């Protein structure tokens, strides 16, 4: 059965880390889109979406990542996605998006990359 | 990955043979899709559950039937036939809808998408990340079937009315026990 999904925000200088916690499924995935839309309105420039605590993702979750990535690109902002592992990695690979998404292996490295681009 | 996979249209496919399969009927209640999936998954042996990938793929098929097939009309049912063993999974999911009219358009879209992928041209691929039809809404991710044609390695086949999809996958047999020198 679907579990809950929470979103927590952390800040490292100008970079915001969005920790997604729980199942990114057809009932929950929209929450990520809503949060990022509000952050874009607040002129936040650098985003890291951390999926380290996501045990399950479905096509709605992938769709949310695609939408968020498109919104961020359209506004000239930057995104990294980290913590991609297990079934989340497998689903992203099955949809052939592993190289399309800006996936970075480690959270620290993602933050470093975004700081360097500042 | 050198071949471009497609969804088949073949009423006579052996994947539509239902003999020996379990059968369940569900109301088209969108809130219950993950629960329905778990009811089907109860029959799956642990060898093929694969870090919840099988569950995820079955959930997508049921979601498509409830949402796109039956338009979430609770009077319409979704029927699922399924068979699992330690080396294979086989399902048929049928709804009461008008059928997947965009099947050919989807195959063409997926062909162009896969060509971008094979060229590693991710800028061009941005035009093909999600497949939408006039019936799609803002919550439709438009990418479930891209994974399905890769995951179900024995095929994704629709019947003539296009309201039933049959899928099957083989799993590698794992060897158990201790190897003696």
Image (spheres, rainbow, N blue to C red):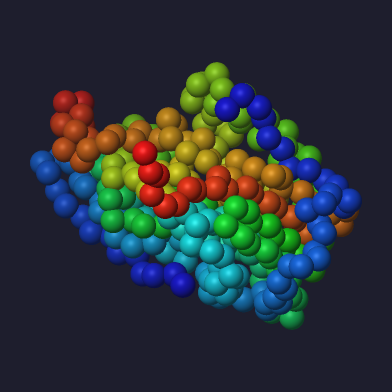
Q: Position of residue B127 (x, y in %)?
A: 57, 32
Furthest-left residue in view? A13
Residue sitting at x 56%, y 22%: B118
The C terminus of chain A lies in which quarter of the figure? top left
Q: Quadrant of residue A14?
A: top left
Q: Is residue B12 visible?
A: yes
Q: Which of A60 and A75 is in front in this view?
A: A60
Q: Can residue A31 be seen in this view?
A: no
Furthest-front residue in view? B181
Q: Where is residue B107 in the image (x, y as percent from the top left)?
A: 72, 37
Q: Where is residue A68 in the image (x, y as percent from the top left)?
A: 40, 45
B12 sits to left or right of A83:
right
A70 sits to left or right of A79:
right
A101 sits to left or right of A108:
right
Q: Which of B172 and B166 is in front in this view?
A: B172
Q: Position of residue A51 (x, y in %)?
A: 31, 50
Residue sitting at x 23%, y 59%: A8
Furthest-bottom residue in view? B75
Q: On screen, B17 above or below B178?
A: below
Q: On screen, B34 above or below A45?
A: below
Q: On screen, B4 above or below B164?
A: above
Residue sitting at x 12%, y 44%: A12
Q: How many labels does the image show?
A: 0
Residue sitting at x 55%, y 45%: B172
């Amino acid at each position: 059965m679907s579990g809950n999904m929470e979103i927590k925000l952390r800040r490292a200088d100008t970079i915001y880390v969005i920790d997604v916690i729980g199942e990114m499924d057809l009932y929950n995935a929209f929450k990520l889109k809503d949060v990022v839309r509000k952050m874009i309105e607040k002129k936040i420039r650098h985003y890291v979406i951390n999926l380290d605590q996501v045990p399950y993702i479905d096509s709605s979750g992938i769709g949310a990542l695609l939408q968020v990535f498109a919104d961020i690109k359209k506004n000239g902002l930057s995104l990294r996605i980290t913590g991609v592992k297990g079934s989340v990695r497998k689903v992203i690979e099955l949809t052939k998006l592993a190289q399309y998404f800006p996936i970075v292996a480690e959270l620290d490295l993602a933050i470093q990359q975004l700081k360097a681009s500042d | 990955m050198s071949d471009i996979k497609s969804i088949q249209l073949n009423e006579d496919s052996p994947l539509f043979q239902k003999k020996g399969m379990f059968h369940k009927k569900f109301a088209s209640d969108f809130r219950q899709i993950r629960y329905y999936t778990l009811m089907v998954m109860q029959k799956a042996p642990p060898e093929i559950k694969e870090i919840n990938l099988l569950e995820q793929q079955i959930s997508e098929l049921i979601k498509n039937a409830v949402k796109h097939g039956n338009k979430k009309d609770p009077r319409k049912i979704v029927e699922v036939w399924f068979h699992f063993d330690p080396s294979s999974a086989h399902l048929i999911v049928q709804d009461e809808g008008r059928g997947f009219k965009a099947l050919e358009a989807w195959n063409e879209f997926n062909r162009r998408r896969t060509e971008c992928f094979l060229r590693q041209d991710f800028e061009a691929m941005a035009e093909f990340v999600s497949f939408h039809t006039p019936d799609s809404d803002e919550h439709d991710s438009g990418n479930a079937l891209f994974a399905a044609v890769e995951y179900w390695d024995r095929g994704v086949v629709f019947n003539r009315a296009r309201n039933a999809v049959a899928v099957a996958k083989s799993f590698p047999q794992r060897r158990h026990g201790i190897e003696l020198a």
